[in-house]
Image (tube, rainbow, N blue to C red):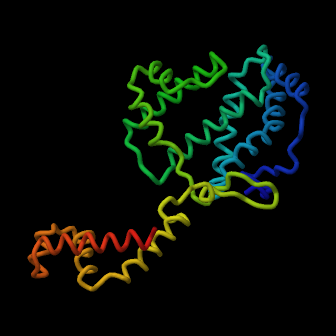
């Protein structure tokens, strides 16, 4: 998607580049009701929409739709931006565009979330956006929960439920030569080098046990039988089972250490 030139019928390679002072001057004309200036301003900021869409490269099959949805966010940003504030338009517009695209992805996610949970999540997101507009900073979960008058746990659950599902192949960093994907950042604690060595050592240690000791350990630790049940099944006393089990474990422990 990042190499795509035409998206939603727009040739992105021909989009104009304006400096910040040019953007602010054009925005004044837009706020004055100049429709021609408004159209020109929208076109001048389509690169902004494209840059946001590229963040969601894992959804390249929806690139055209996301671009159109991002344009809706851009229009909302134009209508609500206060040019008297000492803030770049792009700083204000990007969260609006991202919000629209995320809403689109959530609503079209293959994982279905109940309507009541989505309503709580959208209510929380709306409260978050209003908080940011008023305070120019991100609210905490506790602050969001207070605004919507709901428990923090309920708000957290709702937001998690509609959060975007990421692919393990999702790229999270690229230095131009090598791409690091999400799966590269996930540790496999069950199959680490130390665990593999322990498993190999355990396998070798078990080979040194007698057939009866192997049988007892199998029934005790894999099947889950008690010593009494094992004694009845193999035809020896519980005391003998206990002694064979302890000897087997001692052999394994000494072999591994």
User: In the image, residue 6 lies at what x, y percent?
Assistant: 78, 55
Q: Is residue 23 left or right of residue 246?
A: right
In x, y percent, where is residue 129?
58, 25
Where residue 17 appears, as percent x and y from the top left, is 89, 39
Task: Please give the name of the residue rendered at 35% of the width and 74% of the height, measured from the top-left corner.
Answer: 251
From the viewer's perspective, is 99 left or right of 5? left
| Relative to 161, residue 134 above or below | above
Q: Residue furthest bottom?
A: 211
- Above or below, 230 against 117 in this view is below
Residue 168 found in image quarter: bottom right
Left or right: where 157 falls relative to 30 = left
Measured along the vertical axis of the image, is residue 81 above or below residue 223? above
In the picture, measured across the screen, residue 8 lies left or right of residue 36, that is left
- The quarter of the image holding the N terminus is bottom right
The number of discs equals 0
Residue 48, percent across and down?
77, 39
Q: Residue at x 58, y 20 (%)?
A: 131
* Residue that appears at 67% across and 44% down: 68
Outermost residue to the top: 84
Q: Nearer the viewer, residue 57 or 15?
A: 57
């Amino acid at each position: 998607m990042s190499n795509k030139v035409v998206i939603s019928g727009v040739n992105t390679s021909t989009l104009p580049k304006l400096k910040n002072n040019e953007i602010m001057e054009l925005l004044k004309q837009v706020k004055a009701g100049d429709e021609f200036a408004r159209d020109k301003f929208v076109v001048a900021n389509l690169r902004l929409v494209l840059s946001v869409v590229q963040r969601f490269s894992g959804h390249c099959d929806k690139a055209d739709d996301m671009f159109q949805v991002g344009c809706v966010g851009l229009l909302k940003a134009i209508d609500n931006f206060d040019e008297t504030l000492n803030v770049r338009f792009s700083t204000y517009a990007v969260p609006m565009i991202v919000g629209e695209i995320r809403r689109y992805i959530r609503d079209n996610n293959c994982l279905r979330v109940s309507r009541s949970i989505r309503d709580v999540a959208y209510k929380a997101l709306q409260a978050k956006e209003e908080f940011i507009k008023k305070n120019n900073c991100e609210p905490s979960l506790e602050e969001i929960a207070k605004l919507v008058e709901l428990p923090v746990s309920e708000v957290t659950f709702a937001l998690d439920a509609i959060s975007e599902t990421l692919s393990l192949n999702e790229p999270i960093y690229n230095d131009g030569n090598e791409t690091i994907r999400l799966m590269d950042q996930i540790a496999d604690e069950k199959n680490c080098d130390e665990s593999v060595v322990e498993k190999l050592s355990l396998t070798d240690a078990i080979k040194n046990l007698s057939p009866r000791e192997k049988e007892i350990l199998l029934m005790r630790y894999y099947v889950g039988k008690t010593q009494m049940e094992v004694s009845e099944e193999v035809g020896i006393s519980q005391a003998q089972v206990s002694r064979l089990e302890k000897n087997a474990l001692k052999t394994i422990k000494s072999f591994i250490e």
